[in-house]
Image (tube, rainbow, N blue to C red):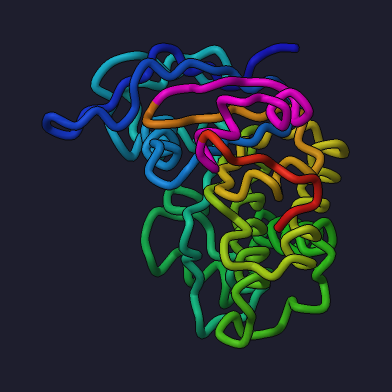
Amino acid sequence: MSSVLKVDGLRKEFGGLVAVNDVSFEVGHGEFVGLIGPNGCGKSTTFNCISGLLKQTSGSVEMFGEDVSELRPDQIQNLGMTRTFQHTRLWRQMTVIENLLVPPRGQFGSTFSDRIRAVLTPGSNPDEVERLERAYSVLDQLEVPHMAHNLTSELSGGQSKLVDIGRSMMGDPKLLLLDEPVAGVAGPLAMKIFNNLRNIVDETGISVLIIEHNMDFILRQGVDRIIVMNEGEILMQGTPDEVRGNREVIEAYLGASGDLQEGSE
């Protein structure tokens, strides 16, 4: 399996604090990978270094065979990577479909007015007609076409997360980085989000790297492989079954006497 993402010896320091230390892993084409670990273990910092929001202290990041360690976030995005953040960033007084139609910076015009014009006059050129069709297709993939004309201010937290994922998919990315997309989302909807992502990976061949704090939840959600971080370092990498049975992982989450129970909450 060819790699779309290769992280090698990544290290990030903040003053005297080492937040990420010698982190190395790969994500293959069409692979659905979970990045998990206790709060404060360096997951989001790793994401920020991969996506160019933070400059790593040392180490390298390759994407689609190209070294992106020195590139800006927009340059990395143009290669085919998109990411979400823990907190959704939606236009609250626009509808769901309008949020999906707002082009990312640097696409369909470089100014704010160009981006808004793309929403207000979606049929004004062939590119925008195609984008409108793409937006409805994304909502179909996420199984929420009925929400197209709802204001995002009316949505629940979980529904807002779905729209945020939908926005990230609008550019047909080859690699999607999702930062805790089900944090604070009720169980049934959280499972729906993961199931939809699994289906999208299988149907499109996109690669997904997803941060999740709840280990028991992600172990039951059909990811191909899990990378476990603890105290800024990689503790282990393996299949869900391998992670579930690893004593070091259990201790990192629950302490030396802890134990994971199948189906526990």
Residue 223 sits above or below residue 161 on the image: above
Q: Which image quarter holds the C terminus?
A: bottom right
Residue occupying the far front of the picture: 257
Q: Residue 240 at what x, y percent from top left?
A: 75, 31
In magenta, the rendered stretch is 233-255
Q: Quadrant of residue 46?
A: top left
Q: Is residue 22 visible?
A: yes
Residue at the image position 40 percent from the left and 37 percent from the top: 41
- Residue 31 shows up from this direction: no
Question: Considering the image in quadrants, where does the N terminus appear?
Answer: top right
Q: Residue at x 71, y 50 (%)?
A: 217
Q: Quadrant of residue 208?
A: top right
Expressed as whole percent of the image width and height from the top left, the position of residue 81 reads 55, 36
Image side of residue 50 versus residue 37, left or right? left
Nearest to the observer: residue 217 or residue 61: 217
Percent x, y for residue 18? 24, 28
Q: Was residue 111 drawn as part of the magenta stretch in this picture?
A: no
